[in-house]
Image (cartoon, rainbow, N blue to C red):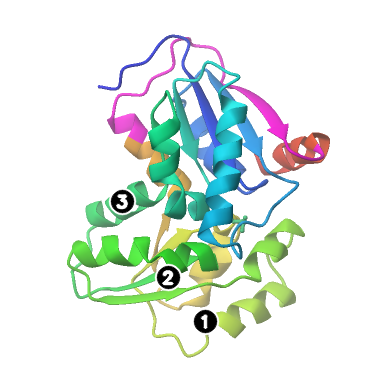
Amino acid sequence: MMERKTPSRVGVFDSGAGGLTVVKSLISHRLFDEIIYYGDTARVPYGPKDPTTITRYAMEALEFFMNFEIDLLITACNSVSAHALPRLRSDAPFPIYGVIEPGILALKNAALSRESRILVLGTSATIGSGRYQRGIRELGFENIEALSPSLFVPIVEEGIFGGDLLESALNHYFKGIEQPDAIILGCTHFPLIADAIQGYFPNRPLLIHSGEAIAEHLEKMGCRPGSTTETELKIFASENPEGLKRIAEKWL
Ligand code: DGL
């Protein structure tokens, strides 16, 4: 069981708005009383940046969370989870959870034969780290393809969740790819176009959503809210917090 105070307050960090997909899962699983969300909207996207820069930004975000008495911090951003966890963990006075291990664990728990084809989707930083690929290989899967469909991020940020533009982007990245049996949505933005991604392949592969995976993981670890009221969400951003709050109203 996880040691925690009551009421339970969690910090969620992301490069921008994308981590709200993780917040959505945390709220629907009703795990915490309060969520403090911080999006580094001034410097998004992290995906094309190098590991040193991503780690530096993450350490600055950690400073922000030091102002709150949080019980744990979730790095909703896959790019941060891929590169900055060891540094964050060595400096933080609270536990820090990334989204990559829970995603791999969710794949482990799915009823899939080890011959299944696994497609991992993430930013260049996430795919470049090889973290998902290594973890999946350690589970015994050998048919792994990893892809960085970078255009999906701005498309989602434009609020485009279907239609011709998204179809051509899907086709651009997925044509020539053998049908996967499971797809890891290893980027905060991809759950918002999950139906389009899944629908591209006639066999409708199983999707692993990192927000759901971390929520289920924390649930199994015994995370429960201390009160019966609804989860309170407080949103902060390095730039234009009002804009981020408007996105949250639309997405949540
Ligand atoms: N949050 C990022 C991730 O999940 C996607 C957006 C970005 O590139 O910053 O990797």
Above or below for 129 versus 209: below
Circle 3: element type: helix
Q: Which residue is rendered at x = 67% and y = 81% of the image?
A: 168
- The label shown at residue 106 is 3
Residue situated in front as seen by the camera: 125 or 92: 92
- From the viewer's perspective, is 14 left or right of 116? right
Q: Give the mark nearer the N terminus: 2 vs 3.
A: 3
Quadrant assignment, res 97: top left
Inspect this view and state whether residue 98 appears: no
Secondary structure predominantly adopted by residues drawn in magenta: loop
**How far apart, in angstroms, are the residues tagged by discs 1 and 3?**
23 Å
- Residue 72 coordinates in the image, percent (x, y): 44, 26
Residue under numbered circle 2? 204
Query: Mark 3: which amino acid?
Result: Ala
- The label shown at residue 142 is none
Residue under numbered circle 1? 174
Chain part drawn in magenta = 218-240
Query: Mark 1: which amino acid?
Result: Phe
Residue situated in front as seen by the camera: 131 or 183: 131
